[in-house]
Image: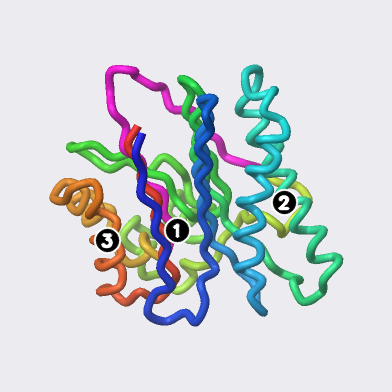
Amino acid sequence: MKYIAITEKGNVRINNEDYYIVYKGEDGLNIFLIADGMGGHSAGEVASSLACQYVIDYILLNQNMLEYSLSETIKEAYRYANQKIINHQIKNPLLYGMGTTLAGLFCYKDKIIVSNIGDSRVYVIDGNEIKQITEDHSLVYEMFKDGKITKEEIYTHPKKNIITRAIGIEEELEVDLYEIERDQNKDYCFLMCTDGLTNMVFDTQIHKIFRENGFYDVGKKLIEKALEAGGIDNITIVYLLL
């Protein structure tokens, strides 16, 4: 396994509300998380970093359960992070309204599970195609699924930043999980990113950069492309080869 993780403030934002965390264990457990926070008074930064850390904390505290129910443990970790962030807002009114997206990739022995809340994304990429695994929890993605707009119009719609699910907003939390059937004879390339990349760079352009550049150059090229397109948001990228 090899991976690259990069976060960039962008051309417009004063601070970086994105966050990522990578945990590599010696027991077959590897966790990759990215989060895009929201909220004033630096609350987005607080929410994104805390959400990532709380999920890691919960998984490690309940590692004995992974063998029996990896999926349910991941869901409970998200719910734990959600409740903790809600509690932070109750205790500190300055943090009221903070929340975050949270996309994850969990590798445990021969299992790969992708998780998601919000509009940060996880892709699987090979020489032939780029495929989005996660589904955006956003108003424009709902409109796209309902046939009201095209996929191309998602990028320019004035309401593209409205998300419909996030950590820290509501007590009840529904987490999307995707189990990847792993072929031991095949390499897997995954890309995780916040919408600071996908709002600036089309999937076809992302795929082209992966095809035309070496593994260690891809991240720099993706960031450069997003900045050239405007870089209006924070940009976070984690990509890995399994």
User: Comparing marks 1 and 3, which lies closer to the viewer?
Assistant: 3
> Which SS class for mark 3?
helix
Residue neighbourhood size for the residue with mark 3, other residues' Cα within 10 Å, grouped as few (<14), some (14–19), many (≥20):
few
Residue neighbourhood size for the residue with mark 1, other residues' Cα within 10 Å, grouped as few (<14), some (14–19), many (≥20):
many
> Which SS class for mark 1?
loop
Of 3 and 163, nearer the camera is: 3
User: Comparing marks 2 and 3, which lies closer to the viewer?
Assistant: 3
Left or right: 36 as drawn, with respect to 200: right
Residue 159 falls inside the magenta stretch: no
Q: Amino acid at mark 3?
A: Lys
Q: Residue at x 50, y 34 (%)?
A: 30
Q: Amino acid at mark 2?
A: Asn
**Looking at the picture, how far across and down is residue 61, in whole percent?**
72, 34
Residue neighbourhood size for the residue with mark 2, other residues' Cα within 10 Å, grouped as few (<14), some (14–19), many (≥20):
many
Q: Residue at x 70, y 46 (%)?
A: 173
From this view, report whether residue 103 is shown above or below residue 124. below
Query: What's drawn in magenta, residue-wise?
Result: 174-195
**Residue labelled with disc 1:** 194
Residue 192 falls inside the magenta stretch: yes
Left or right: 73 as drawn, with respect to 131: right
From this view, report whether residue 18 is shown above or below residue 15. above
- Mark 1 near mark 3, Cβ–Cβ under 8 Å? no
- Mark 2 near mark 3, Cβ–Cβ under 8 Å? no
Rendered image coloring scheme: rainbow
Q: Which mark is residue 82?
A: 2
Q: CA distance from mark 1 to mark 3?
A: 15 Å
Residue found at the far left of this picture = 212
Give the mark, 1 or 3, whose residue is nearer the N terminus: 1
